[in-house]
Image (spheres, rainbow, N blue to C red):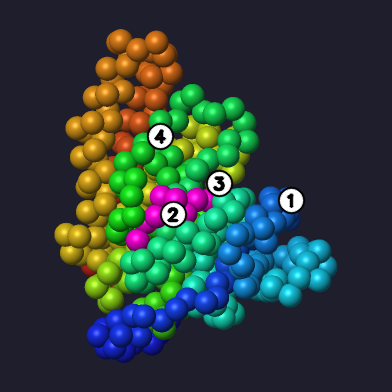
Amino acid sequence: MNPTHSKQDGQQRTFKGRKLSSVSVVICTYNPANYLNLKDVIYSLIQQSHKVDEIIVVVDGEQTLGDKITLEYDCRKEMKVIVTQQGVGVTRARNIGIRAATGDVIAFTDDDALADKRWIARLLATYQSTNAPAVGGKILPIWLSAEPEHLPEELYWLVGVTHAGFAEEKITEVRDAFGPNMSFKRQVFEAVGYFNEKLGFNSHRTSYIQGEEPEFGLRVKNKLGRGVIYDPEAIVYHKVSPSKLKMGTLIKRSFYQGYTKALIQKLFPSTESLETEKSYLRGLALRAIPRRVKTIFSGPNRFSGAKQVSVLLLCVGAVGIGFIYGNCKLGVSARGNANVI
């Protein structure tokens, strides 16, 4: 991918003072079994308090699903359905959506999410008040089974939900937003390029390597001098299925998160690239874990507290193992002049 570059000060002048009048929302999907969830998120976008000018659904290689969506929403002029070649993966699908979008702001959400009615209004208000290049918001869970007793809030990032300790409860700058709730001014892609297609879940989730969001966030900050602004009142709800809560899945995703962090460090060797993770670990070590250990001995829910501490330690340990493995593997690849991604 060859991004279009221009001088940073020129980009800042371009961003400054321009009124954002139109919004495109990109949703990527691939699984026909998720069709009803997809309809739910489209409905939540149609019902926004601030009009969504385009809803772009990018379908990964499922022509029948694409035809079904097209037929369902044939009467809605804001709908645009794109069917890709099979197996492009979520990152490339997002880039295809970006190229098709015409809005001043391009937002992203998932095919199993629901947007709060004021989601778009809050994003635009934050752009206007901060002149940010990108804005993301809070992701709250919709548990499709009972609320998990074993999963501590500090690990909600494993299931695509904003975790405890992510950011302060106010408008503030963060390194990156999460896929179900992120947006960018169109000029950002013109200045920085697109998402790195060598990162991110591949087609049908056969690989758990991620990292396209933090990698892009780091590029935005390095190029434009400002990062993503987080607004906790710009809310999206994310449906969490029971399959995502199984211990095997949580451990696997933790390991690949560690591997992904090693990859990000390889791409951005500065000390700032993993500062978010370092701050998170400090918060766990100094506050979260001691507080949770205390509840095992003095709280009314000692059994669930013990389970949550165990899961927290197991998953953080898996992240560490993945990080060490990734550094070893990527180091060997680099010495062999192989592609590190």
Q: Which residues are magenta?
A: 229-236
Instruction: Return the disc, 2 or 4, that comes first in the chain's sequence.
Output: 2
* Residue linked to disc 2: 137
* Residue linked to disc 4: 153
The residue carrying pointer 4 sits among few (fewer than 14), some (14 to 19) or many (20 or more) residues within 10 Å by Cα, namely some
* Residue linked to disc 3: 238
The dot on residue 12 is none
Q: Secondary structure at mark 4?
A: helix
Instruction: Return the disc, 2 or 3, that comes first in the chain's sequence.
Output: 2
Give the residue type that dot 2 points to.
Answer: Gly
Q: Is residue 83 left or right of residue 291?
A: right
Q: Mark 3 near mark 1, Cβ–Cβ under 8 Å?
A: no
Percent x, y of residue 248? 49, 35
Percent x, y of residue 309? 35, 25
Give the residue type that dot 4 points to.
Answer: Glu
Mark in the foreground, 2 or 4? 2
Q: CA distance from mark 2 to mark 3?
A: 12 Å
Q: Along the line of sight, which residue is nearer the eye, 336 or 330?
A: 330
Instruction: Return the disc, 1 or 4, that comes first in the chain's sequence.
Output: 1
* Residue linked to disc 1: 36
Q: Is residue 211 left or right of residue 58?
A: left
Identity of the residue drawn at 33% across and 67% down: 130
Quarter of the image where the C terminus is located: bottom left
Q: Secondary structure at mark 1?
A: helix
